[in-house]
């Protein structure tokens, strides 16, 4: 077989291994994601229990990265203390090594059985949990199949002179070997896959013990970089957990590289099989780090906090967008909806501040509106990006519909924030600085429309959260009432102008602009009801009524309903 074809086959087997790992993680998260999160959240009593839960969770997820993201999100939200979270991570590292040991067992028929059971289970199941279990079994079968393919591909490479020279070079430069493995782990987002690849190469006699130790150490370091990058948006508390885990693995890798020769001699005497030496080294690496650092998680957390302190109080960030939930669509959509409701609360606060500025001539309240609007833009952008990342996974029809509703409502709330800032707040500042005053009647009319808008915001949030058809009808009907109030106030305002009322003449432009902007705000709110009413068939796709042939187009067609 030509070397190029062998290399392609090896890459394909590695890709299949990664895909199987992803299927396991996704399947387990969808079938038992909530349960696993409860397991990890219980790790608050003592560090030994925390490490045990981290190990068990990683056995289920087949990924210490997933465990790290969940643990980091818990630390960021105060559900778990930093020392307990670090203990969970030490257990998760050992869990990854245990998974590698289990996968190294050479039982060929298990792969075929898992693939068969996974396909049948996924095809026949209707519930989310059943399909998740089927997906996980399929992934396990593909991983075992990939390992077998790797073994078959690497067998002829034992006689390759070029590969022998490369491996010899790695043996003479263990630091380069460690950096290579770390890079591969980061690129593949899996230290487990890299360790299994090294195991297959070592089992084929292609890698000696010293470079194998360096590769295992580097893979462990690279495996800690991925979760550190994954929680970058979670806040300093989550980043400190993953940074501490990275520091622990770097310390372990440094010790391995420093004592590579004596450790290799020890492994050669204890384990005869070359491939199993890699697994033994991986297990020993994680176990020794667990024993060394478990008593030191407190000082470790304090040291990391010095390098990554809490930032000063500043702008509002996302409070509920948990990165660890992206593999569980139902839960991810729930927290995205909750964050969107938080945006709605900020819009409500802006409405209240603008009312205070308009009717009480409070300039500080108008300035508060401008301070809140960037928070809404930032949170809306975070929600859209979160939903976009979620859309990469397999979503069913209901999940896609809900994701679209969340994105649409968040965008409408963002537009409302823009209208309140550039319309209502700017009008209030103009009125205050020019020492203008509404007529008593005009002020009362604007206050009524404003209060109706605030009430409709609360109603829209209820419709968005509960998807209640009766509330959706009520929200659409409220838009007609707002239109009536706007037309009535405009007519009365024009009447005051004709009567020569000085207050009306001075504030005419402001009054009419405010009515227009409040009407636009309500139009954005009403949009949340449209998908619900469309589903039950009570909302027309077009507001145009069909006209009879020959009918005068100028003839009124009656009020819109």
Image (cartoon, rainbow, N blue to C red):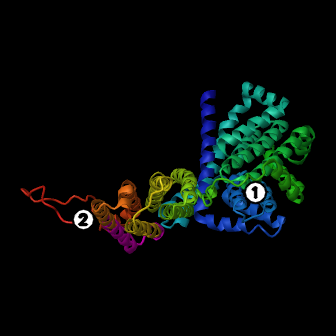
The magenta stretch is 461-484
In this picture, residue 319 sits left or right of residue 45: left
Main SS of residues in magenta = helix
All told, the count of numbered labels is: 2
Residue 331 to residue 19: above or below: below
Magenta stretch containing residue 306, yes or no? no
Farthest residue to the bottom: give it: 470
Farthest residue to the left: give it: 550
Residue 216: x %, y % from top left: 79, 43
Q: Secondary structure at mark 2?
A: loop
Residue 247 to residue 440: above or below: above
Magenta stretch containing residue 471, yes or no? yes
* Residue named by callout 2: 560
* Image quarter hosting the N terminus: top right
Q: Secondary structure at mark 1?
A: helix
* Residue named by callout 1: 92
In this picture, residue 155 sits left or right of residue 397: right
Farthest residue to the right: give it: 262
Q: Nearer the viewer, residue 556 or 209?
A: 556
Residue 214: x %, y % from top left: 82, 39
Which numbered mark, 1 or 2, is in the foreground of this view?
2
């Amino acid at each position: 077989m030509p070397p190029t074809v062998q290399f392609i086959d090896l890459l394909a087997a590695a890709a299949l291994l990664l895909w199987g790992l992803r299927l396991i993680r996704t399947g387990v998260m969808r079938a038992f994601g909530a349960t696993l999160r409860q397991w990890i959240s219980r790790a608050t009593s003592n560090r030994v229990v925390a490490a045990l839960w981290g190990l068990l969770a990683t056995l289920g997820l087949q990924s210490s990265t997933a465990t790290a993201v969940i643990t980091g999100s818990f630390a960021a939200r105060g559900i778990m203390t930093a020392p307990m979270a670090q203990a969970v991570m030490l257990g998760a590292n050992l869990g990854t090594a245990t998974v590698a040991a289990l996968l190294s067992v050479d039982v060929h028929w298990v792969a075929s059985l898992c693939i068969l059971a996974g396909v049948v289970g996924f095809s026949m199941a209707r519930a989310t949990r059943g399909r998740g279990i089927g997906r996980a079994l399929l992934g396990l079968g593909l991983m075992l199949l990939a390992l077998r393919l790797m073994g078959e591909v690497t067998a002829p490479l034992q006689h390759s002179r070029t590969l022998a020279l490369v491996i010899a070079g790695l043996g003479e430069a263990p630091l380069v070997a460690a950096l290579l493995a770390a890079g591969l782990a980061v690129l593949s987002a899996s230290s487990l896959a890299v360790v299994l690849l090294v195991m297959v190469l070592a089992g084929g006699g292609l890698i000696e013990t010293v470079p194998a130790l360096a590769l295992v150490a580097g893979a462990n370091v690279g495996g800690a970089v991925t979760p550190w990058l994954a929680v970058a948006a979670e806040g300093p508390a989550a980043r400190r957990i993953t940074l501490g885990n990275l520091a622990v693995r770097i310390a372990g890798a440094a010790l391995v590289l420093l004592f590579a020769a004596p450790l290799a001699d020890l492994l050669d005497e204890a384990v005869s099989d070359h491939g199993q030496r890699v697994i033994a080294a991986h297990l020993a690496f994680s176990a020794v780090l667990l024993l060394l650092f478990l008593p030191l998680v407190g000082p470790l957390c304090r040291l990391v906090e010095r390098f990554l302190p809490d930032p000063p109080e500043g702008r509002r960030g996302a409070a509920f967008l948990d990165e660890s939930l992206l593999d569980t669509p139902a839960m991810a959509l729930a927290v995205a909806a909750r964050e969107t409701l938080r945006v709605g609360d900020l819009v409500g606060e802006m409405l209240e501040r603008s009312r205070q500025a308009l009717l009480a001539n409070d300039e500080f309240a108008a300035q508060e509106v401008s301070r809140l609007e960037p928070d809404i833009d930032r949170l809306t952008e975070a929600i859209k990006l979160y939903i976009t990342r979620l859309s990469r996974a397999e979503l069913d029809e209901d999940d896609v519909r809900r994701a679209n509703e969340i994105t649409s409502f968040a965008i409408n709330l963002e537009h409302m924030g823009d209208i309140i800032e550039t319309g209502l707040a700017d009008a209030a500042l103009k009125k205050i600085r020019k020492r203008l005053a509404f007529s008593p009647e005009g002020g009362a009319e604007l206050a009524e429309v404003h209060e109706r808008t605030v009430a409709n915001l609360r109603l829209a949030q209820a419709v968005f959260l509960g998807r209640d058809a009766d509330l959706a009808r009520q929200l659409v009907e409220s838009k007609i009432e707002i239109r009536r109030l706007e037309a009535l106030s405009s007519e009365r305002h024009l009447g005051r102008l004709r009567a020569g009322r000085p207050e009306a003449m001075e504030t005419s432009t402001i009054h009419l602009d405010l009515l227009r902007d409040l009407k636009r705000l309500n139009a954005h709110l009403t949009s949340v009801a449209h998908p619900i009413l469309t589903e039950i068939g009570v909302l027309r796709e077009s507001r145009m009524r069909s006209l009879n042939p020959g009918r005068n187009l100028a003839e009124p067609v009656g009020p819109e309903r």
